[in-house]
Image (tube, coloured by chain):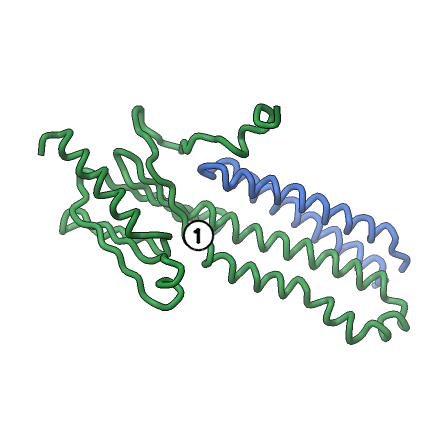
């Protein structure tokens, strides 16, 4: 198998797992969290996760394999 | 202005599912932050592992023209570390004990889809005990809080609670006011 295709499959899988798990984490924090701590954690998680995801996509778009 | 825009982050009532009418939250307890800092530091170290690989093998990676691929793999590694950190933080923040003027409710989140909620009414509390053992628990003042109801029922044990003596006093105060209110 071409290494480029393999990278695409692995990256796609990790991105999918990342957003599904992110949704579950945000859902739990907002739905079951009591007080302000879980809401703050959800905010930090979303902003940080979106930033890291953007960075990963940026690097992925620069890949030349 | 800021306070009006984002009240959810600075002021939310400690309301919870199943709260009864007239039930007021006195305390929301979570485990001592020390218990989450150690696993988070461990994840941080794991997240930084690729930097060690880069320091030792950067020339070889560049020579094989894999630098871009390496940085992409590193960014995915960071994403997974971020998920793992917040998975632990989610479990930490959802594992809580709520003390109200009527009940003590323990929420145990053992995984995303494994949750256990136990409760006991404060009028049934007979004894509250505090146990601190070990160097860190003594220095950072956290420990185990056990609440005993009727003899035939199980004991409620809350682990790694910060300032357990203060919590014990708060519970006993609620129990006493409840009993005096009932004329016991």
Q: Which chain is green?
A: B
- Report the number of numbered marks: 1
Q: Residues within 10 Å of mark 1 (few under 14, many from 20)?
A: few
- What chain letter is assigned to the residue under label 1? B
Give above or below for B100 relative to A53.
above
Q: Is residue B104 left or right of residue B60?
A: left
Q: Position of residue A12 (x, y in %)?
A: 74, 51
Colour used to depict chain A in the structure image: blue
Q: Position of residue B49 (x, y in %)?
A: 68, 68
Q: Could you say which quadrant of the image residue B81 lies in?
A: bottom right
Which quadrant: the C terminus of chain A? bottom right
Closest to the observer, A29 or B29: B29
Give above or below for B57 relative to B75.
below
Residue drawn at (83%, 62%) of the image: B69
Give above or below for B148 relative to B70.
above
Give above or below for B32 relative to A30.
below
Closest to the observer, B4 or B60: B4
Closest to the observer, B102 or B177: B177
Residue drawn at (45%, 45%) of the image: B94
Q: Which residue is most to the left?
A: B184
Please name the residue that numbered disc 1 is placed on. Answer: B110
Q: Is residue B171 left or right of residue A58?
A: left
Q: Position of residue B6 (x, y in %)?
A: 58, 29
Q: Position of residue B127 (x, y in %)?
A: 18, 49
Secondary structure, mark 1, is strand
């Amino acid at each position: 198998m071409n290494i480029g295709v393999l990278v695409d499959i692995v990256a796609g899988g990790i991105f999918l797992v990342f957003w599904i798990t992110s949704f579950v984490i945000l859902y739990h924090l907002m739905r079951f969290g009591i007080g302000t701590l879980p809401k703050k954690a959800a905010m930090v998680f979303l902003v940080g996760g979106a930033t890291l995801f953007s960075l990963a996509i940026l690097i992925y778009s620069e890949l030349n394999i | 202005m800021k306070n009006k825009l984002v009240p959810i982050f600075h002021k939310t009532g400690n309301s919870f599912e199943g709260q009864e009418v007239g039930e007021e939250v006195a305390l929301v307890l979570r485990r001592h932050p020390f218990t989450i800092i150690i696993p988070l530091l461990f994840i941080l170290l794991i997240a930084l592992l690729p930097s060690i690989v880069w320091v030792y093998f950067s020339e070889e990676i560049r020579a094989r023209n894999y630098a871009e691929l390496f940085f992409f793999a590193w960014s995915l590694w960071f994403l997974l570390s971020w998920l793992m950190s917040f998975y632990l933080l989610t479990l930490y923040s959802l594992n809580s004990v709520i003390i109200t003027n009527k009940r003590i409710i323990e929420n145990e989140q053992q995984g995303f889809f494994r949750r256990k909620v136990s409760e006991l009414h404060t009028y049934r509390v007979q004894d509250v005990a505090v146990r601190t053992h070990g160097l860190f628990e003594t220095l950072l003042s956290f420990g185990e809080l056990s609440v005993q109801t009727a003899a035939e029922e199980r004991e409620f044990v809350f682990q790694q609670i910060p300032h357990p003596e203060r919590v014990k006093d708060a519970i006993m105060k609620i129990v006493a006011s409840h009993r005096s209110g009932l004329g016991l």
